[in-house]
Amino acid sequence: MNIIIYTLIILGIFYFLLKLLVNTSSKKISNYSRKIIIFGLIIFALILAVGGKFLLSVPLTLLSLAVVKLKGFSIIQLIGLFRLIQTLRNSGRFSFNKSQNIKNSSTLSLEEAYKILNLDKNKKNTKNDVNKAYIKIQKKIHPDISPETARLSAIVNEAKEVILKNIS
């Protein structure tokens, strides 16, 4: 029922806008459209200036994941994988550009390992918690699922080992 009401409201607004547009001169229409375009571009520039790094990195990362041929992912899983990749990229351990030098991943810090497995380091994590987080991530990026994610899988393995050594 709500959709019918919303449709009638939208059609009514559209009708009155078209009626107003017919009675307006083309010079006024061009002036208003020019002002709207300029105002819209200024707003868009401000949005990109404030949040451009994040706004542009999410779509580009999701597009690059499509190149990796990860199939059957939900948007929640993609966001989790995006967070993992961002953590690794910030620490310099992962890059989509293969020619770029990447740090040797043999020295993961404990804090990085917790971030990679998305665990709270202040909480008392058991081996079971670590294994659950590890399995959850590995189901998404295991090399048997997608061979292109072998580097990510190796880093997640190392993160699990670092945390388990610290717990023991």
Image: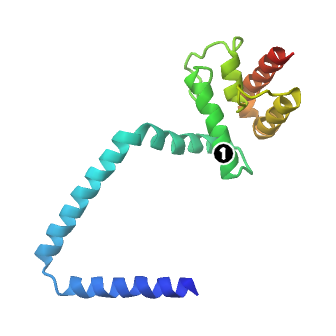
Is the residue 140 above or below the residue 18 in the image? above
Q: How crowded is mark 1: few (under 14 residues within 10 Å), some or many (20 or more)?
A: some
Does 148 sit left or right of 131 as displayed?
left
Q: What residue does disc 1 label?
A: 78
User: Is 104 or 10 nearer to us in this picture?
Assistant: 10
At 24% from the left and 60% from the top, the residue drawn is: 37
Quadrant of the rendered image containing residue 130: top right
Picture coordinates of residue 57, whole percent (x, y): 50, 39
Quadrant of the rendered image containing residue 20: bottom left
Amino acid at pointer 1: Leu
Q: In which quarter of the image is the N terminus?
A: bottom right
Is the residue 40 above or below the residue 163 in the image? below
Does 15 sit left or right of 57 as displayed?
left
Does 28 sit left or right of 82 as displayed?
left
Picture coordinates of residue 21, whole percent (x, y): 22, 82
Disc 1 is placed on an element classified as helix
User: Is 97 or 39 nearer to us in this picture?
Assistant: 39
Quadrant of the rendered image containing residue 24: bottom left
